Amino acid sequence: MTACPVEYQAITDGIETATAKQDNVRIGQETVDDALAIVNKTPFTATDLITGIIIDKANVAQYMATPKVPMASITIAYSGYATSNDYWNGLAKLPQPKLRPRASSSSI
């Protein structure tokens, strides 16, 4: 889950309400720290959950590193989560093939 500049612009323009992004810097830091502790055989506390960051109109400006992009120039806004859900939900609705029992290995 990583937000992108297209989404930041959509939030700024009021088209999208919010998005979420992973704290990839913290994930990287804790992964390296834990790996070093394992290699050096020193104790450490494993982190099971690193919360994501909600980006909305109140804080979107701090994440916008690129200049404003005109929405008319954007041809594809991809959300892997929504697309993958649509894909799997659609796939589940397809007719299922009729299955035949396999011949047992003893009869071959």
Image (cartoon, rainbow, N blue to C red):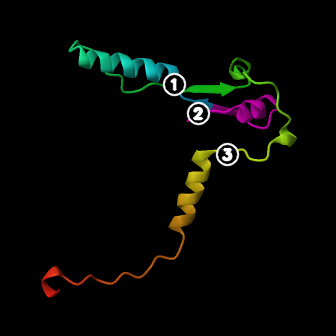
Q: Which residue is mark 3?
A: 78
Q: Quadrant of residue 50?
A: top left
Seen as rendered, the residue at the extreme bottom is 107
Q: What is the quadrant of the N terminus in the image? A: top right
Rendered position, 81 above or below 88: above
Q: Which residue is mark 1?
A: 24
Q: Residues within 10 Å of mark 3 (few under 14, many from 20)?
A: few
Q: Residues within 10 Å of mark 2 (few under 14, many from 20)?
A: few
Q: Locate residue 57, reporting x and y percent.
A: 74, 25
Helix, strand or loop under label 2: loop
Q: Locate residue 25, reporting x and y percent.
A: 51, 20
**Could you tell me how far apart the alpha carbons at marks 1 and 2 are, in whole angstroms?**
9 Å
First in sequence: mark 2 or mark 3?
2
**Is residue 5 magenta-colored?**
yes
Q: Residue at x 58, y 29 (%)?
A: 21
Q: Amino acid at mark 1?
A: Asn
Q: Locate residue 17, reporting x and y percent.
A: 72, 34
First in sequence: mark 3 or mark 1?
1
Do tag 1 and tag 2 residues touch (Cβ < 8 Å)?
Answer: yes
**Could you tell me how far apart the alpha carbons at marks 2 and 3 are, in whole angstroms?**
11 Å
**Is residue 49 magenta-colored?**
no
Q: Which residue is mark 2?
A: 2
Q: Residue at x 12, y 83 (%)?
A: 106
Seen as rendered, the residue at the extreme left is 106
